[in-house]
Image (cartoon, rainbow, N blue to C red):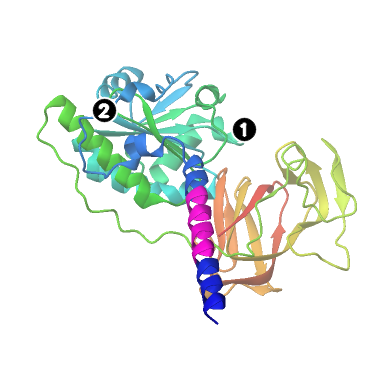
Amino acid sequence: MTNMKKEIKNAIIAGIVVICAIAGIATYFMSLDKPGLENSSLAQPIFGNTSQVDESQYPLAPDLVGISGYVNTTPDALKSSMKNEVVLYDFWTYSCINCLRTLPYLEEWNTKYADKGLLIVGVHSPEFEFEKDINNVKMAVQKYNITYPVVLDSDHATWDAFGNNYWPAEYITDYLGHIRHEHFGEGDYDQTEKVIQQLLNQRAHALGLNVNANMSLVNLQPHEFSDQQTPELYFGYDFATGRSFLGNQEGFHPNLTVTYTLPSTLQQNYFYLDGDWQNLDDSMKLISDSGKVVLPYYAKDVNIVAAGPNVGVQVLLDGNPVVASDAGGDLQNSTVNVSENRLYNVISSQQAGPHVITLIAKPGFQIYTFTFG
């Protein structure tokens, strides 16, 4: 019995030694996954010692190049206002629902921090040809109450200079112009605002200013996404390459007008056409006297990016006129009047779920995408 207890004791001790060794090795390899994090100024407490930052380790933001127009500013005024400011570059385009859902945060930050050294620059990099028109951009700036400067990056020259690939995308520089933070897509608003606060306080310390950024955070309700949400659907044959969700057997025929007929069976997340539609690189345009777009989807909100000469489009939800509780902001009496090249919110239900939306259109109606929320 004594020898057995001793053997058991030795086995336990050996086991503990092995466990400790494994834990030590695991800790070492975990540290390898985070190179340099402890040396990053963004990893330090937001209101820590802001004087011990070597900005030169961060890349300088490229210049705004290839700008074709200015809204809420002029070239000289913008250049002057950027000096010694913390700059947030927001890459957006006005038909992008993800961009539009980010705008309220940008406006709140502009109101809260503009007098403390923050300058927001909206870099409008279009997805569709109609978004290159400065009058359309001005319309959107007014519609969404954007008060900070907006520049038109119509040929994506500044987009390319930043190496950007996303809408929306935020790049934030310190007061010396070094890029200190990047964020792509929606979300993480608290983290972004804390970076703004940190860089503003670093700026104030470096310039000897008695200015401190408010430590509170903007309190807005972020958009809630559904796990099963239908993805964005494109109607243009160029945009649909590699991600075609046109359900008709007739398919795409570039630059031709095709007569489409609805099949007997519809598949979720595929759109179906009825009538004569002209296939364009970025959209479909109705040519016949009447036509339909039918889509089984799963989402809470449905938006269309569309154009037309004051075209009234009737909207049905599950085969019936849209009731008030499901109506989007651009829908009146189950009809959306398409008179501008922009995004229209047609369905806004209380909860996400499976539905079928039908658009009954007239000649001249042009549709670019379905987007969801």
Q: Main secondary structure of the magenta part?
A: helix
Residue 107 spot, x, y in % from top left: 33, 45
The answer to whether 258 is drawn above or below residue 23 in the figure is: above
Q: Measuring 82% from the left and 66% from the top, which residue is drawn there?
A: 266
Q: Quadrant of the C terminus?
A: bottom right
Q: Measuring 48% from the left and 30% from the top, which residue is drawn there?
A: 134
- Residue 303 versus residue 84: which sits nearer the camera? 84
Residue extending farthest to the bottom is 1
Residue 185 spot, x, y in % from top left: 51, 46
Q: Measuring 55% from the left and 26% from the top, which residue is drawn there?
A: 156
Q: Amino acid at mark 2?
A: Glu
Q: Is residue 194 left or right of residue 249?
A: left
Mark 2, secondary structure of its residue: loop
Residue 207 spot, x, y in % from top left: 15, 25
- What residue is pinned by disc 1? 129
Residue 93 spot, x, y in % from top left: 51, 39
The stretch of residues the image draws in magenta is 13-26
- Residue 271 versus residue 242: which sits nearer the camera? 242
Residue extending farthest to the left is 210
1 and 2 marks in contact (CB < 8 Å): no
Q: Is residue 360 left or right of residue 142?
A: right
Disc 1: CA contacts within 10 A as few (<14), some (14-19) or many (>=20)? few
- Whether residue 22 is in magenta: the answer is yes
Q: Amino acid at mark 1?
A: Glu
Which mark, residue 102?
Answer: none
- What residue is pinned by disc 2? 85
